[in-house]
Image (cartoon, helix red, strand yellow):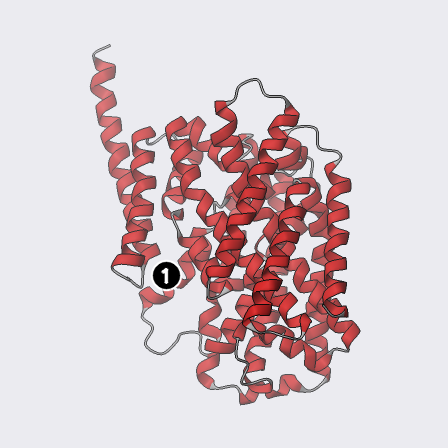
Amino acid sequence: MNGGTLAILGYVALQLVIGYVASRSIKNERDYLLAGRKLGPGLVFFSVFATWFGAETCIGSAGEAYASGLSAVRADPFGYAVCLLLMSLLLAAPLWKSGFTTLGDLFRERFGPRAEKVAVLVMVPSSVMWAGAQVRAFGQVLTSSSGAPDEQNTWLMTTVAAGVVIVYTTVGGMLADAYSDLIQGIVLITGLLMLLVFAYTSGDLAHFSAINAEHLALIAPGEGWLDVAESWAVPIFGSLVAQELVSRVIAARSPQVARNASLLAVPFYLMIGVIPVVVGLLGSVVTPGIADPEHVLPATAARYFSPVLMVVFQGSIVAAILSTVDTTLIASGSLVAHNLYLPLRKNLSDAHKVLANRIAVASFGVIAYGLALSSDSVYELVEAASAFGSAGILVCTLFGLFGTFGGERTALATLLTGVGVYAVQAHLLESTHPFLSSVGSALAVYTMGALLESRAAVPAEAGE
């Protein structure tokens, strides 16, 4: 390993120390998962900002913009910015007032324990795929910093990244995560702004005029309106009620903080998220011929930065990745431990509950590592994570949070329909609009099921 790699690992070690110090205040499961619901505006702001600002925004978006142009990056940062806006305006305060620890709790209280368990089994794969994307991106950054981006070295660096991330995430809870997000957010914003300033002062931004017109088109050649709608729907509605984002807003100290801090994060997410897209587009002109598009961000940065500044920049990318991967692993771990395992074990101590969550987090870290090695790209993993099974979760959560229309059987049918339709459309029929199909089908099934349940309840009440 060279000096750059060691410096990055040193930065990660610092995050481990922060996580360890913060974790000493953890007394019970709610402390571990929600920081005791005491996060103030600053921590909520940086935490929400950092939740989606990870590998897909930096490594993935830059690579997609480099390879395919502006039409390939509608999801991130633009789609996810809209997702954050809808969360802050519509859902943040109601979710906080619900008092739930996880989204699975909403399904238990509103639809029953069977719906809770099915919902958890549907949500967990998405979180693990998201974590896999972050681990893969971490490995890409370490590979680039090592100066030998071959297949064997990528495997080695991804393995190192996975080990570090698993330890870091297992040690820290939500409070450690929030404090780390504060530091990582500052480092990330600094690194990306530096890159933009150096690109401007070098005169390279003038090369935008030389970018192929197709690369700057918002709609790719041959794309229909359904293709465009699908590309927007996946990040906006596929992630709107994801456990990763929900946990951030319900960890705030009040519904006002949950709403206002997450709303403030939206423009910052969009402004900073555009920078990797600009770099990717610019890279297609100033650094053509990169074998792996996911290396375009560090390759472009290397044009402007000294070795020392390059280490700082790579540290900022690591910050983005760490701020997302710990969230995704905690999300999947909490759903399994809190909603599946702990209900089976009565009268456990607070220490045992926290331990169960940590074991679950570490286990999903290992699974995420396997996904990172088997996937072809960061963006691919993220889009799969956003779309898989989320249609049924979205429909049930919205109906369950804002009304009493529909019961357990309706929720179960909707959840299974969302997963089934998406799987058939995406993998068997190879449809280009699997997410839209799954959302429409889930909405139809929920509506019909709720109407049937309400009609069946009327004769029952009349006979009493």
Q: Which of these two is toward me, 276 or 1?
A: 1
Q: Quadrant of the C terminus?
A: top left
Q: Quadrant of the N terminus?
A: bottom right
Q: For residue 403, which quarter of the picture? A: top left
Q: Secondary structure at mark 1?
A: helix
Quick one: which residue is furthest to the top in this view?
Answer: 464
Q: Residue at x 57, y 57 (%)?
A: 135
Q: Which of these two is toward me, 99 or 295?
A: 295
Specify the amino acid type for callout 1: Glu
Q: Which residue is mark 1?
A: 230
Q: Which of these two is toward me, 23 or 10?
A: 10
Report x, y in % for residue 189: 70, 63
Q: Residue at x 55, y 81 (%)?
A: 290
Lateral position of residue 78 relative to residue 163, left or right: left
Q: Is residue 263 visible?
A: no
Report x, y in % for residue 447: 28, 39
Q: Residue at x 33, y 46 (%)?
A: 418
**Image position of 464 with respect to 114: above or below:** above
Report x, y in % for residue 146: 68, 71
Neighbour class for label 1 at 10 Å: few (<14), some, many (≥20)? some
**Image position of 307 with respect to 463: above or below:** below
Q: For residue 411, which quarter of the picture? A: top left
Q: Which of these two is toward me, 315 or 68?
A: 315
Q: Is residue 137 visible?
A: yes
